Amino acid sequence: MSTRIEMTENPGEDELSAILRPLRAHNRSKAGDPKPETIALLVRDEHTNEIIGGLYGEIFYRWLFIELLAIPEQTRGQGTGSRLMNMAEGVAREKGCVGIWLDTFDFQAPAFYQKLGYTEFGHLDDFPPEHKRFFFQKRLA
């Protein structure tokens, strides 16, 4: 087979799908069906019903990856983040997950996740420059 490599800036869904197709096929052949599922826990303004924050994640190979956690400024310190994380743990348990993992920056909430029982399994220095990006996990019983 003859091939060539080209660079594409700002690839679209077609390019992403073309790259994912052989990767997913290989992963399935080695590890089985990942049984992907996306979840979202939405924080809404009670008066306007507008979504003002929440948690977004994906279950993949029996692990929940929390991709996004956004706590509205006006609700910080009121337990909203802890409630969202506890709800996410409940969903993960219901779905038979082994654990949960996530990443956060040093200027976001590493201490918050540690307080909830998450342990660091890695970090990147200078991402963004002069900061750290932390990776945390929590195994579920």
Image: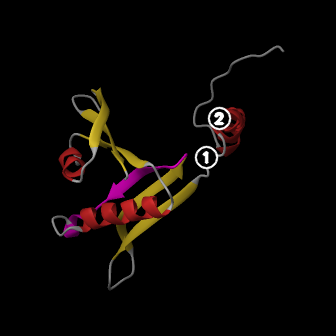
Q: Neighbour class for label 2 at 10 Å: few (<14), some, many (≥20)?
A: few
SS under mark 1:
loop
| Rendered image coloring scheme | secondary structure
In this view of the protein, which residue sits in the foreground, 140 or 47? 140
The foreground one among 53 and 98 is: 98
Instruction: Judge by depth and name the residue closer to the eye, 51 or 101.
Output: 101
Q: Residue at x 59, y 52 (%)?
A: 36
Q: Residue at x 82, y 13 (%)?
A: 2
> Can you name the residue that lies furthest to the front here?
141
Q: Residue sitting at 71 percent across and 38 percent down?
A: 21
Q: CA distance from mark 2 to mark 1?
A: 9 Å
Q: Position of residue 7 (x, y in %)?
A: 63, 24
User: Whole-percent x and y of residue 42?
Assistant: 40, 69
Residue 27 is tagged as 2
- Which residue in the structure is indicated by mark 1? 34
Q: Is residue 139 above or below residue 3?
A: below
For residue 72, side relative to residue 24 (left or right): left
Whichever of callouts 2 and 1 sits on the residue coming sooner in the sequence is 2
Amino acid carrying mark 2 in the image: Asn
Q: Position of residue 95 (x, y in %)?
A: 51, 60
Q: Label 1 amino acid?
A: Pro
Q: Which residues are magenta?
A: 61-75
Q: Quadrant of residue 55?
A: bottom left
Q: Is residue 77 above or below residue 99?
A: below
Q: Is residue 33 magenta?
A: no
The one of 50 and 124 positioned closer to us in this rendering: 124
Q: Is residue 54 visible?
A: yes
Q: Residues within 10 Å of mark 1 (few under 14, many from 20)?
A: some
Q: Of all residues shown, which one is farthest toward the bottom?
A: 47
- Left or right: 134 as drawn, with respect to 90: left
69 vs 14, left or right, is: left
- Dots 2 and 1: beta carbons under 8 Å? yes
